[in-house]
Amino acid sequence: MPGQEQLKSSVIDKDLCSGCGMCLGLCPYIKTVLDRVRVIHPCGINEGTCYKICPKTSLDISWLDQLVFSQPRRDQALGVYRSINFARACNKSAGAQYGGVASALMAFAIDRGLIGGVVLTGGTALDPKPVLAKTGHEVLSCAGSKYTAVPTLAALNQAVRTSAERIGLVGRPCQIQAVRKMQHVNYMEEYLNSGKSVQLTLGLFCFWSLKSGFYDYLAQKACGEEVLKVDIPVEGLTVTTSGGVSTWPVDEIRHYIKDACISCTDCTSEWADLSVGSTEYDSEWNALLVRTAAGDDLVNLAVKEGVVEVRPYPEERLPILRKAVLNKKMRILDESGEVVWDYLKVPGEYMAEIRKQWEVLQ
Amino acid sequence: MSFFGVSLDRPGHSVVLTGNEAVARGAIEAGVSYAACYPGSPTAEVLPTLARLGDRFNIYTEYSTNEKVAIEGAAAASFAGLRSLTICKADGFNVALDFATAICLSGSVGGMVIMVGDDPAAHSSVKEEDSRFLARTANLPVLEPATVDEAKEITKSAFDLSEKLALPVVVRCTTRICHASGDVCLGELPQMVKQASLSRDQKSITSALFASFTKNKLKKAAALAENSPFNFYTGPENAKRLVVASGPSYTYTAEALEILELAGSVGVLKLSTTWPLPEELILKHLKTAGEVIFAEEVDSFLEDGVMTLAARHWEDVGLIKFYGKNSGDVAGPGGPFVGELNPDIMTGCLGKVFGVSYTPPEIPNIQEARGLIKNNLPGRELALCAGCPHRASYWALKTAVELDGRDVIVLGDIGCYTLGLRSTGYNVLQTVHCMGAGVGMASGLGKLDRFNFRQPVISVVGDSTFFHSVPQALINARYNQSELLCVVLDNETTAMTGHQPHPGRGVNAAGLQVGRVEIESVLTGIGIPVTVHDPYDVEGTTRVIFRLLQEKGPRALILRRACALVSVKGKKKDRVYVDQELCIGDSCGCARFCSRVFACPANIWDNEKGKAHIDEAVCIGCGVCASLCPQKAIVVERTV
Amino acid sequence: MLASQVIAAAAVEAGYKVSIGETFGASQRGGSVMSHVRISRKKTYGPLIPKGHAHLVVGFEPLETLRILMEYGCFETAVVMNDRPNYPIGCLLGEDKYPDPAIIVEAINRMVAQNQVLAATELAKEAGNPLATNMVLTGALSGSGCLPFDSQYFINIMDTLFTGEIKELNTRAFRKGLETVRRDQG
């Protein structure tokens, strides 16, 4: 099993790093600033944890399905899930995005003592940062989508060094993948395995993440006003400042998309306990996928306690979501139908199904 | 020890002094009133010796910001009729040279002596330079002591000579005088009243018109040199084999001849007046000699001069075979113009020239001994001291540069921090030239964008370097709108040369508090935005450097933290140790970061146990390694 | 550096002529440091000892002692040395390997007739401060009997050179070195 040198040559130097942050804080040799992750000095060790847990060194889709769900997937677009709904927080907090479900559920979980802390992305739109929240209040203060690639998992590694336990994670799909890899990889050094402290994962919908150059763009567009909220729905980039709301076409920010996101096929955090995203339809609600028993238990309790409300996912909207996801999955194939990316392991059966399910929706 | 020896009022008594102390004593005995220097190895100890005795002997002593200012102040004292001493190393004399070439024309009044310390083998320098050539260019006589005792006598006599000629005199010493110690016979302490006097009628004008006057002064110096008591000859009369030697090389030569048993057959002309040459004296010996060997450091100054003299008088001296640096016969392992001489080199060279073979006593079992250690004798590279703030600065700088990823160019300069060129400083620096050069070069690099040069430029300088010559380059950068980040490593002292104070410290040579010249204020005055940070906060420093790298225009960062050697002097140190349970040593997650990478001399590694340790004899308790340990295994027991 | 000056001062008190050659400055930043001390009744010698002519080598750490001995020693050279390694940065970084100190001592024992090894740093710690190692070794040198003047000159000179706590510390350290060597010699 390779180590830091190969992590550098096959992921970092190739711009495949999505900035998930799982390798940060494991050792003194990998550091971060903004959305960048860099090896700053060779460690000299041939086999390393960093390589093992990085979601871009290898991602075996069916292996992960077996690990997390003990079954293969049937829906190639959305992965394994128990239910899909619209959901929203009953008392939405000020900065919350759309239905505010992610922050409401996690704040509830921590206030109820179901988990001991939450690792998520806090800060502001122009200066986001990884956060370990200890109370529901702290979770809610982090509400609001951050569209840049923040290495949130650095806070997980740090939390574990302070003996934090039963941690909840709110993260992008690549971050959920990294944690799952860390939870299941063999021969992991005890003192480095932060995966085993994670009790609950809430993954976000994500089609791409942006480079930190986006902040300069945002600051420029805001013309000196304070940026209160950023939203990037299908229509375009919408920025709310103290001066008002403005929209710009999404094409303007395409070149800020991280290169790593091009190879990614996981648009809905396929291995999280819960997945939350925008509905692209009703800005008052979130789309909510419940995937595991643990996720199910939390949602049921939250509904019972009046923290969130759910309603069925509109039938006519589901194909739209699935089509958008399958489009992205099809783009990883070359002309001959092979997966372009070495690290991505998609079994033949899955590949055939992806093609079939995609064709149905054309 | 020697300190109390320097001020002892016991004429005729012998004390052991270092060469620098001997020069100081010689100046004191000559009644010096004004002494100025910018600290430079090997001469750095002269001024503090005088400073401590400044009140007792009424001497004004000054750490000048650079050697140019030092020599100018000393010249002014001379102009006012006082005896003055300027002290610098060869590199420093380069800085003072513009003025030196002027004052030889305008002349001096009170005895003005310039003590220049050359550093053969560059023990504490970036280059070996022979300052005698510079003195000649400046039309100044050169006196070279060969022993510590001579250093005192010659310095004392140099003031008289300077007044006789109305010309400054250079006393040229080398490391093996300055940092050597030897018996010095003390002379009388001065009883004079020192009175400055300068009238409106006195002129000190530099003009090409005075060149002939200066040349005449040198002729007079040459005439005086013929009878100088510091030149002497030992050996047989009318020697056919002659060694012409100056400086400590004379003592190596004398010892070599003893070892080779040639003292009776080879003559040695020892010269201390090496510019202008005592031509008659030299010619007298050249006339009878058939073979002449030169023993001197650093370059072939004496050799060239004597050979030119011989060429001018070829009819009188006849055929002579000359052996020296030019012929390659007098050379150390690095070659004729490289490195210092010593008794062994002279023994080898003289033996070869005179056909006497000599093998130094060997240790009989040396091969066996070598075999035991498998011929493995690891070299001892220079390293930053334990707790040195530069180590922390360089680690932060290295990290920030890697994160930036644009191939940032990092330029260095002269000081302890020059060690950033080596592994102890993580090879962060890529250049070093002379004082302040890093900023000048950075200013140039920062203008190359029109030639598609897009790499950010960082120039690293020390605090003492800053006051020496950096503002000029920064004004240039600001004026010419050059892109550069100037990082000032402010350890609040001039460390490498012995912790002398400088304007930023707010203490002068006499130890008085004088109010600091703040580096921040100078930078702000120039119009360069300045940030200040503590390098011991490595993470914070990394972020600051990264942020500054993204900004535009000339900007500066001061990383301020006192030199480790100064901060712990006389104080109780916090105890630092490695929790053996928490240390993961070699494993993934650390890979021996503290001892293998961070490499503070206090971070040591126990190979048998596979754990890190702190060498308490060396550790100063700064805690930087503790802040970097990934397992938080290094513990600092703060008592302060 | 301080040790060589103390030795020189003691020698001068005892009526000898002394020359010392050493380097300060850059070489103090972890580089090789050696001092050449030359003592004579009659002559003032140059500051550097010719190869193979050292009568005595006082080593502050094993590797340097060996290095210097190989260049300046001969069979008759008497050695007084500290057993505690001072690792060069190359060894700390793992680029070089510091030889086993016990083997270094063994190598030195093969080379010279007289080698006095002591745990000078430990003795200095006992005296109160590991920085007094140089005084321990100076005491050991005096105790070896190889110098042409006796230890009383050292005691006297330390009385003049140092004051207060420093004097107490240095004198204690000196005595420890002196007594250890005298005891070992039996």
Image (cartoon, coloured by chain):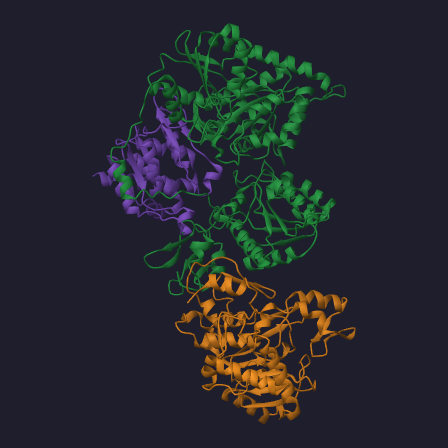
Chain colours: A orange, B green, C purple
In x, y percent, where is residue A348? Answer: 49, 80
Residue B613 appears in the picture as rendered: yes
The residue lying toward the viewer, choosing from A143 and A146, is A146
For the point 66% across and 71% down, the residue is: A124
**How many numbered badges does the structure rendering display?**
0
Residue A127 lies left or right of residue B629; in this view the side is right
In x, y percent, where is residue B378? Answer: 37, 44
In x, y percent, where is residue C81? Answer: 31, 40
- Looking at this rendering, what residue extends furthest in the front direction? A336
Residue A126 appears in the picture as rendered: no
* Rendered image quadrant of residue A70: bottom left
Residue C169 lies left or right of residue B164; in this view the side is left
- Report the quarter where the N terminus of chain B lies: top left
The residue lying toward the viewer, choosing from B16 and C21, is C21
In x, y percent, where is residue B122? Answer: 49, 34
- Looking at this rendering, what residue extends furthest in the right direction? A243
* Rendered image quadrant of residue B221: top right
B364 versus A3 height, above or below: above
- Looking at this rendering, what residue extends furthest in the left direction? C186
B610 versus B567 height, above or below: below
B79 versus B52 height, above or below: above
The residue lying toward the viewer, choosing from C169 and B222, is B222
Residue B547 lies left or right of residue B383; in this view the side is right
C17 versus B456 height, above or below: above
The residue lying toward the viewer, choosing from A138 and B444, is B444
